[in-house]
């Protein structure tokens, strides 16, 4: 059994503050003061996933560090020896994901922008307030599941906060979810605002992930790939006019209002990102 794991940082237990834990500017030599802690927590969650997968019969596990270019969201020195890691591939989509994989697993994912009671909710990047595909609001969970489904790979597992788990189950009702934290604010708060969150301990989160992954692998061959068919009508609403202006010059893109653009008849759902 060959598994592909999408890894992000915002859905990891203990990661609750984006400016302090998730950001860096390599050109300026600036790194968030708790970035290394967050990367360590994420890697140990990935290792727990690997342990659970191996116990259920997985033979090959490949993970993609989806939290930006190097240094990314994982610490390679701590990586489980049975896992291979795709590094420095950016955050534009699961690199190397093809039909040779038996299942997609998403680790440390977050809910889409505008989701209440979510921890660090956003869609792709902080200045995007909403992204819809044929009228359906989508985020990174949707896009990863779609990318896998396009090559016939089913989405069977997700770990993250409670809001992310609910989002995943709306797409694939049979997906197994490991909930490691939850937001306590009824407001839909973005990346730059502090909000209360209730987290499992890192050890408890890893044990939850380990057990849930082992259960999820029994669903390989029983869960259908997540699919949507083109053509797609895409709409993106941004936090400022300049972001809409940047995309308004693309072929076929029209300006809906000062901060919103639309593309009709797209053959892929990510063309306005």
Image (cartoon, helix red, strand yellow):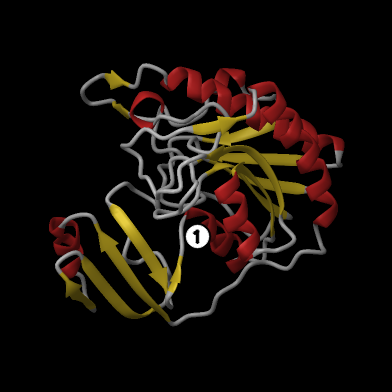
> In percent of the image, x 69 and y 61: which residue is there?
154
Q: Is residue 186 left or right of residue 76?
A: left
Residue 87 at what x, y percent from top left?
A: 49, 35
Q: Which residue was labeled with disc 1?
A: 143
Q: Is residue 262 left or right of residue 46?
A: left
Residue 255 at what x, y percent from top left?
A: 18, 74
Location of the C terminus by quadrant is bottom left
> In percent of the image, x 56 and y 50: which residue is there?
164
Q: Is residue 165 above or below residue 119?
A: below
Task: Tell me which corner region of the image, top left, top right, bottom left or bottom right, holds residue 63.
Answer: top right
Q: Is residue 260 above or below residue 1?
A: below
Along the line of sight, which residue is nearer the eye, 16 or 91? 16
Task: Tell me which corner region of the image, top left, top right, bottom left or bottom right, holds residue 199.
Answer: top right
> In percent of the image, x 67 and y 63: which residue is there?
172
> In percent of the image, x 53 and y 38: which residue is there?
11
Q: Is residue 59 visible?
A: no
Q: Is residue 79 above or below residue 168?
A: above
Residue 271 at what x, y percent from top left?
A: 35, 66
Along the line of sight, which residue is nearer the eye, 168 or 147? 168
Task: Tell me which corner region of the image, top left, top right, bottom left or bottom right, holds residue 57.
Answer: top right
Q: Is residue 112 visible?
A: yes
Q: How many marks?
A: 1
Along the line of sight, which residue is nearer the eye, 135 or 71? 135
Residue neighbourhood size for the residue with mark 1, other residues' Cα within 10 Å, grouped as few (<14), some (14–19), many (≥20): some
Residue 3 at what x, y percent from top left?
A: 70, 47
- Name the secondary structure under disc 1: helix
């Amino acid at each position: 059994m060959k598994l592909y794991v999408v890894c992000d940082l915002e859905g990891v237990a203990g990661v609750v503050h984006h400016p302090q834990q998730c950001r860096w500017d390599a050109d300026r030599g600036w790194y968030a003061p708790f970035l290394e802690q967050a990367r360590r927590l994420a890697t140990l969650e990935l290792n727990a996933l690997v342990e659970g997968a191996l116990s259920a019969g997985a033979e090959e596990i490949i993970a993609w560090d989806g939290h930006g270019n190097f240094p990314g969201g994982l610490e390679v020195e701590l990586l489980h020896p049975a896992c291979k890691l795709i590094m420095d591939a950016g955050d534009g989509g699961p690199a190397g994901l093809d039909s040779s994989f038996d299942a997609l697993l998403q680790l440390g994912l977050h809910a889409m922008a505008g989701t209440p009671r979510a921890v660090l909710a956003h869609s792709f990047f902080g200045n995007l307030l909403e992204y819809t595909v044929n009228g359906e609001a989508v985020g990174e969970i949707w896009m990863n599941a779609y990318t896998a489904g396009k090559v016939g790979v089913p989405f069977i597992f997700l770990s993250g906060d409670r809001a992310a788990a609910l989002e995943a189950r709306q797409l694939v009702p049979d997906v197994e979810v490991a909930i490691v934290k939850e937001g306590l604010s009824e407001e839909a708060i973005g990346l730059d605002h502090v909000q209360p969150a209730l987290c499992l301990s890192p050890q408890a989160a890893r044990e939850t992930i380990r057990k849930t992954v082992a259960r999820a692998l029994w669903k390989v061959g029983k869960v259908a790939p997540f699919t949507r068919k083109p053509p797609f009508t895409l709409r993106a609403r941004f936090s400022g006019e300049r972001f809409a202006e940047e995309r308004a010059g693309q072929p076929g893109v029209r300006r809906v209002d000062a901060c919103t653009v639309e593309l009709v008849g797209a053959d892929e759902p990510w063309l306005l990102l």
